[in-house]
Amino acid sequence: MARPGIKFVSRAAFLRDGRFSASKRRAVVKSMEAYGSQLGTLYYLMGLEQLLEYKRAGHPVESIKRAIAVLLLIATQIQEHFANTVMYRIADVGTPHVDFDRFPETAWSRYFGMANAGQFTRLAAALSSRMRSKFSVPLKEALLAFLALFHRSSRLSDVIRLLGVSWTVSKASQIINTFAVTVAQLFQAQLAFDARYFRPDWVEAAASAVAAKHSPLAGICAFIDGTDQPIARPKGNDVQRAFHAGKDEGRCKTPISWSNQASWRNLNSTGQQASRGACLEILLILAPLACYGIASRFAGVMDPRLMMVQKRPVSAYMLTAVLLSNMIVCDDQTNPVAQYFEHKLRIPTLDEYLTPGPLPTS
């Protein structure tokens, strides 16, 4: 059966519908009130004209008076009905699924943080091949909705308009939350850095690269753009092996020893290491684009308006943003920190990164 082109909803439900702007909702409600008033008045006048004909034909006056009262009641009910009901064309609020052809090439970097449509397709395919969970929409659409919400810290109503879909705000929220929770649970191995990147052989190469570039900073081997979360801190016996992610500042401590006795330090801007100031400034500039940094790609995870809403899986948002950031780095192989250190820090391919277990050595 063909889908109807017109939909009726209550005024209260329409005023809560985030797919429309507040001004659009007010304008539609006002137009419906005017339409109801005109229709009720027209019904009353047409009925009154008919009753006048009955009076001329000699019908009892009392019967005509009762008919006028009923006529007035019905006209009033018509006005009230349209004052509390909104009618709109379904096509005006989008389609059930995303039309990916609607986005120009510039939209992928501006709204979704992708280099281009091809990169989005590769990331979606890599996730799809490893995820068997069923979503209410295709995985590509759930991924795109997550990117749209968090790349530039958008509202759900903005996401719906950007994607051109007919989802309600509650449906969009459910899609994004389910996607984030599923991804975070499925890819825990990729997000636990203890057995993957931070092994002694990779760490030694990182320390060597840093020392070769800035000898005063020997031992600082990671620059993690922050979220106040220790997302890159290895696990295991050597707790806090000198990797730390901080939003506003790092920390500069006494060198910490790995099992192979390599020393490590974290960054700090307190002035305790004034002689390192110039080098530190350079590194802090690099930090927002660093490998495993997420703020430059997902501004939304830094936005308290999104993060403080009740019943939102904030930790899943964070972990999913980290995973997608890492996937982007592995896909384009253009990590600025690795480039800055003359590619002495090997970046895995996208397939290597998403494969469970230790990364292959160079």
Image (tube, rainbow, N blue to C red):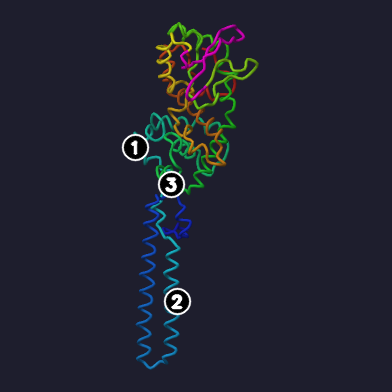
- Neighbourhood count class around disc 1 (C-alpha, 10 Å): few under 14, some 14–19, many 20 upward: few
Sequence-earlier tag: 1 or 3: 1
Label 2: element kind: helix
Q: Is residue 143 above or below residue 265?
A: below
Picture quadrant of residue 299: top left
Query: Mark on residue 104?
Result: 1
Q: Is residue 279 above or below residue 44?
A: above
Horizontal and vertical percent for residue 338? 44, 15
Q: Nearer the viewer, residue 70 or 252?
A: 252
Q: Is residue 207 above or below residue 67?
A: above
Q: Which residue is mark 3?
A: 165
Amino acid type of disc 3? Val
Task: Tell which residue pokes out farthest to the front in this image.
Answer: 271
Horizontal and vertical percent for residue 195? 60, 18
Q: Which mark is nearer the camera, 2 or 3?
A: 2
Q: Nearer the viewer, residue 16 or 209?
A: 16
Horizontal and vertical percent for residue 22? 40, 51
**Residue contact between numbered discs 2 and 1, judged by CB atoms under 8 Å:** no
Amino acid type of disc 2? Leu
Residue 257 on the magenta span = yes
Task: Tell which residue pokes out farthest to the right in this image.
Answer: 237
Task: Tell which residue pokes out farthest to the bottom in this image.
Answer: 58
Residue at 44% x, 84% y is: 67
Sequence-earlier tag: 2 or 1: 2
Query: Mark on residue 73?
Result: 2
Amino acid type of disc 1? Pro
- The magenta stretch spans which residues? 245-271
